[in-house]
Image (tube, helix red, strand yellow):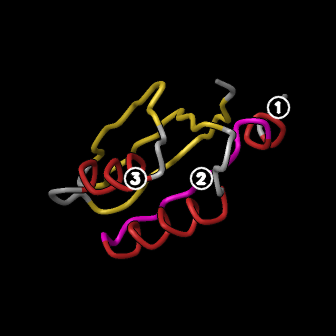
Amino acid sequence: MTSSRFIITVIGSDRVGIVARITTVMASYNVNIVDISQTIMQGIFTMIMLAEAPKENFDLAAFQQAMDAEGKSLGVEVKVQHEDAFRFMHRI
């Protein structure tokens, strides 16, 4: 199976349910977490994930919209970037 990898960042005020609700959206799009790091810094929740989804029939725009909508309902900012774009933007 070929896949497409993404960097997903979540930042905002900490509250109950952020991880549960974000990962529920991910699961509904068959997106798997490859690696994850999260921390709470003085009440600010931060999470970054490397995730992957099957390339076949994966609608990145719809996934980004769903993640953005869930983030807004939680009061956090969610960004989804394709791994290639992320690496290009952050190269040295």
Q: Residue at x 65, y 57 (%)?
A: 59
Checking the image for residue 28, the label placed there is 3
In the figure, 41 relative to 52: above or below? Answer: below
Residue labelled with disc 2: 80
**In the depicted structure, whether residue 6 falls above or below residue 1:** below
Q: Report the mark closest to the observer, 2 or 3.
A: 3
Describe the element under mark 1 as helix, strand or loop: loop
Name the kind of residue labelled 3 in the image.
Ser
Q: Nearer the viewer, mark 1 or mark 3?
A: 3
Quadrant of the drawing holding the C terminus = top right
The image quadrant that residue 33 belongs to is: top left
First in sequence: mark 2 vs mark 3: 3
Which stretch appears magenta?
74-84
Quarter of the picture holding the N terminus: top right
Please state which amino acid type lies under the numbered disc 1. Arg
Badge 2 marks a residue whose secondary structure is strand
Q: Magenta span: helix, strand or loop, mainly?
A: strand
How far across and down, in percent of the image, does residue 34 sit?
48, 25
3D distance between C-alphas at marks 2 and 3: 15 Å
* Mark 1 and mark 3: Cα distance apart in space: 32 Å
